[in-house]
Image (cartoon, coloured by chain):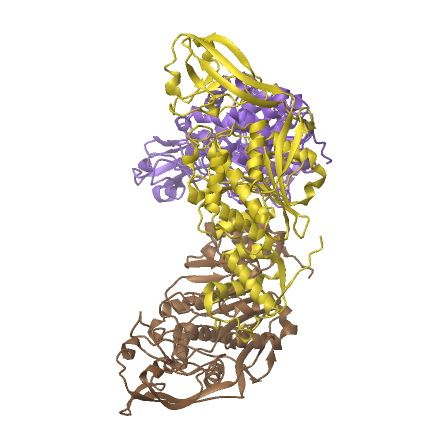
Chain colours: A yellow, B purple, C brown
Amino acid sequence: MDQIQHSDQSTKLMSLIEELYPINRSITGDGVRKSLAILKQHVPLEIHEIPTGTKVLDWEVPKEWNVREAWVKNSKGEKIIDFSVSNLHLLNYSVPVHKEVDLSELKKHLFTLPDHPTWIPYRTSYYNENWGFCLAHNDYVKLKEDRYEVFIDSELSNGHLTYGEFYHPGESEEEFLFVTHICHPSLANDNLTGMSVAAQLGALLNTKSTRYSYRILFLPVTIGAITWLSLNEDRLDRIKFGLVLSLLGDKGPFHYKKSRRGDALIDTIVETYFQNSDVESELLEFSPYGYDERQFCSPGFNLPVGRLTRALHGEFPEYHTSADDLTFIDQKKLIESFEVISAIITMAENDRTFLNTNPKGEPQLGRRGLFKQIGGQHNTKEFQMALLWVLNLSDGENSLVDIAKKSGLDFYIINMATQALLAVNLLREVELIK
Amino acid sequence: MDQIQHSDQSTKLMSLIEELYPINRSITGDGVRKSLAILKQHVPLEIHEIPTGTKVLDWEVPKEWNVREAWVKNSKGEKIIDFSVSNLHLLNYSVPVHKEVDLSELKKHLFTLPDHPTWIPYRTSYYNENWGFCLAHNDYVKLKEDRYEVFIDSELSNGHLTYGEFYHPGESEEEFLFVTHICHPSLANDNLTGMSVAAQLGALLNTKSTRYSYRILFLPVTIGAITWLSLNEDRLDRIKFGLVLSLLGDKGPFHYKKSRRGDALIDTIVETYFQNSDVESELLEFSPYGYDERQFCSPGFNLPVGRLTRALHGEFPEYHTSADDLTFIDQKKLIESFEVISAIITMAENDRTFLNTNPKGEPQLGRRGLFKQIGGQHNTKEFQMALLWVLNLSDGENSLVDIAKKSGLDFYIINMATQALLAVNLLREVELIK
Amino acid sequence: MDQIQHSDQSTKLMSLIEELYPINRSITGDGVRKSLAILKQHVPLEIHEIPTGTKVLDWEVPKEWNVREAWVKNSKGEKIIDFSVSNLHLLNYSVPVHKEVDLSELKKHLFTLPDHPTWIPYRTSYYNENWGFCLAHNDYVKLKEDRYEVFIDSELSNGHLTYGEFYHPGESEEEFLFVTHICHPSLANDNLTGMSVAAQLGALLNTKSTRYSYRILFLPVTIGAITWLSLNEDRLDRIKFGLVLSLLGDKGPFHYKKSRRGDALIDTIVETYFQNSDVESELLEFSPYGYDERQFCSPGFNLPVGRLTRALHGEFPEYHTSADDLTFIDQKKLIESFEVISAIITMAENDRTFLNTNPKGEPQLGRRGLFKQIGGQHNTKEFQMALLWVLNLSDGENSLVDIAKKSGLDFYIINMATQALLAVNLLREVELIK
């Protein structure tokens, strides 16, 4: 894959998010199925259905959850909270209930954000059976003593956990794994940006011949990753690079969280990309708290999987609230995220190790037409420097990513210089014994 | 030793300093014996008497020094300098003398501090026979031409070097060594704070069952450490941790000077403790100048012995002057020093290495009652994070101190999380082959 | 070589620069021969003549270039540009030409510096046959439409590449290599300062008995280094230290560029020297762009050769212009450069590794006359500290340069302490098996 074309991606990325936004998703259920069906229109996906009760590592697949209707009425019969208005109003995984309660009993099941009184919070109770509603604090404080009718027409029963998987075979069975979670209802940055970017990446990869194979997992968080790991344990050694993706549409700088190994090739690639780029970013050491890197980087797997986001989960006020809506997404930043990930893929695809075939002294570049006389875009000081760096460090110990890192030069120019040097036989590829 | 109780320690620490303060100490003599006898009322000590002339490594035990009386009288018979007023007035290890001298001869034997004209300096001449007096510079400048009678009724003769040793056997013969010097006369921060803190630590350890054995040495500086090392050379491999203690009562931040090894476990423990604590501190690389770490860290021993002080010797104006008196001690800082050392002991005692018994993916903590549902003090975000860190890093490569270092979490909470995980069989201890 | 005397060096250094300044040099030709003949009056040099066409690594020795006369006349017959006024006026390696041209044709062959309109630039065209003149931009803008007579009486023909080599045998065949380029015409800082400092170093070394052998190469840049490497490939393993020298007379701080290895002994020596000295300096990582370190540090040789300059080539406005003239040299800085290099040589010569013969505890220095009682220059706190550092780190793992680096003490005082400790048998040298 030489270069990825990005035209029209911005529109595609945003419209997919808009289409997925209204759907009520959870870690299981029809909302997930509907979302995957939409994604499948853009990227070939295999949909997996794993039955409730299946043992997966230390866990088991939970009951499937679906909701038809959910509301609270006051004694006048007015719906004062209604799931059909916003799916955030319902505590995710609420058990079915139909009863009359007084205000004090009702309040035990209500969740609000006093600091942001117009926003609805997003709350879940996956593994602890409960019911509840989320609402704006301004509406909460208006509630009066009354008899309230609570109706949640949900179903929590044996069914399936559903996830989608894209696979693109490359020359090598070694693979680049992307993971994005798909379990949040109407929240945009977390996690529709991850779903949309991952889907468009898949669509693009699907049209390319690649060196590595590519796998993209669209999973419910935690239990989805655990399920996939459990079902694929014998194939994990194929994972050469991995990135957990989410939170890719806000205005903040990128945050790359290193894999548990800390010095995996994906860590070096992303670190080098940001070091040599103008894009604002911050590097984070691994910690065991976060998204699904927790599972991929558990000590028994310890896979080379990092995490790329812009904002950090839990560290921006709109996180897990109704304010993480479509207006929260900055379309320019969204396409930039797509482009950064494409550039990272380009680095992975093109990272090879060469030997300078003329290692004693500098070869005479002028005689080979590589010294300044060339016109056009090659004729830059950066290109001359890239030639010198590639020649000097191509001793079998440094791959092109290492050379980009040490030189501070853009990988693109390092790669161009490499092609030019290969063309005049000043480099040959090192066959690494694996 | 699970936890050390600190009640009433503050009063005990200070009253012991007050009791020891007036005694005239030196590297040998009855002042040392008297001081050790007082300490022995608080902590079981073995008192060692090593005869003058004993060969100890490259040195030999010097003559014992004792003083009965020492003064200078003017021609009117008035005592203008008197050892009985302050033992700092006499040059420590002054030889006996009784003669009449004129002012210019007298001045050759007087020491003052022109920059601090009201303070008496503390001076010694252990290995170069001499006599002299120290006095306030304000008094020195008032001295007139006169005939002065100098009388030093001291004795420098064959006797003993005296030191005290506390030993507390633990489960293991491996030991934690504390060293404090005891040779300074009426100086409070240097070195009575070290003596008092070490004595109270010994008193406390004496009531506890411990994993490691503990040894506390109360020694005259340099020659005491050399003597002890010489007599115990065949047992030095038992020393697993060591700290030289002094200067623990001033208002300054802590200074930890690393062992010569630089990466001994004691270095990691103290570094991690301070990293994760609010207590102000500074870390110093090893240098061959200082207190008795010079001897323990000489290249032929190279023991894992660091040094913990607040102020740095020689780097505060009151150092080795009469201004280092009882009023110089800040009682809150003194007890804080005691607590910091206790916390370091707790880390050493509890540092073990575990294996996560469920290393693939995260174990389901909720099912085991470890996820939020618990009330009380466990139910904190820090505790949840500690559970994740301990699980993620318990791969046999990281001890609990390493996990505290990498997570930035207090060792106490790491240890609590470890206990909780052990209780549900999610950890098992690694049996290290030694 | 215990110490290098520097008296009168300043005058010698400057007068040699003045003598060499007017000569027209290039990468070949009589100017180089004349310059080497002058240098030979100060330092014994072997002059090598390598024929045009000789294959040297990937290159071949070019034709030799000589110029008798070169000028441009206007239609009145006035010389408006004249090589005899400044040799910078002629594009270096210009081919012979004699023709009439109009202004627009002439301008294709003129080079100026619009930003510094009174300076003449220095330009070359070694490997691309061309002719041209360089002039002040102020003179360029005055040129009118006219017919101009261009005359370049140069010769580009089979001949030789000429270089000079100084060799001083020491006790060991292992050598310290200095390299300076000699191919620039009337430019002072670049590169006459390098030639003069290197010649005076050779003159001084020639009078000394040294531990290492010393080689100084006076070479045309790039092709000279490639030629020498090609002819001496079987002897390169003798090079234990190397420094490329140039730009040693400006007012800027020193810049040391590390060898490609990054941790060669020469790197440690220079880094330690500057760390412990008041001389302003900056350390640069290796990069493959620069002077002849490019050749010595190509991956097939990877020799321990760093580069020492003050200014950085290309990074000061006077670089490669007529403003880099004799007035640009600061004589105090020039002699300082000579002294710094001498000090580096002293460190290399005296760097040895010792064992403390009394490694357990500190030896009693007082008994051996090494503790303060000594008068004179030894009696300093620094000397006492140096004694402790040398004793503590002489465990066979640290050489004296390592001890200087870790202690932060001047190498001179470390060396003095070592001599004092050797005199009382507290050290013995480690015989390293090679």
Rendering quarter of residue A226: top right
The number of discs equals: 0
B238 vs A212, nearest the viewer = A212
Residue B51 location, x and y as percent? 63, 34
In the picture shown, does residue A59 fall above or below B230? above
Residue A155 location, x and y as percent? 59, 19
Question: Split into 4 quadrants, where in the image is the N terminus of chain C?
Answer: bottom right
Q: Residue at x 48, y 15 (%)?
A: A109
Residue A298 location, x and y as percent? 63, 35
| Left or right relative to B337: residue A165 | right
Residue A262 in view, yes or no: yes
In the picture shown, does residue C404 fall above or below C312? above
| Left or right relative to C344: residue B322 | left
Residue B178 in view, yes or no: no
Most extreme residue toward the right, as rendered?
B433
Residue A19 location, x and y as percent? 49, 35
A121 vs C135, nearest the viewer = A121
In the picture shown, does residue A149 fall above or below A171? above
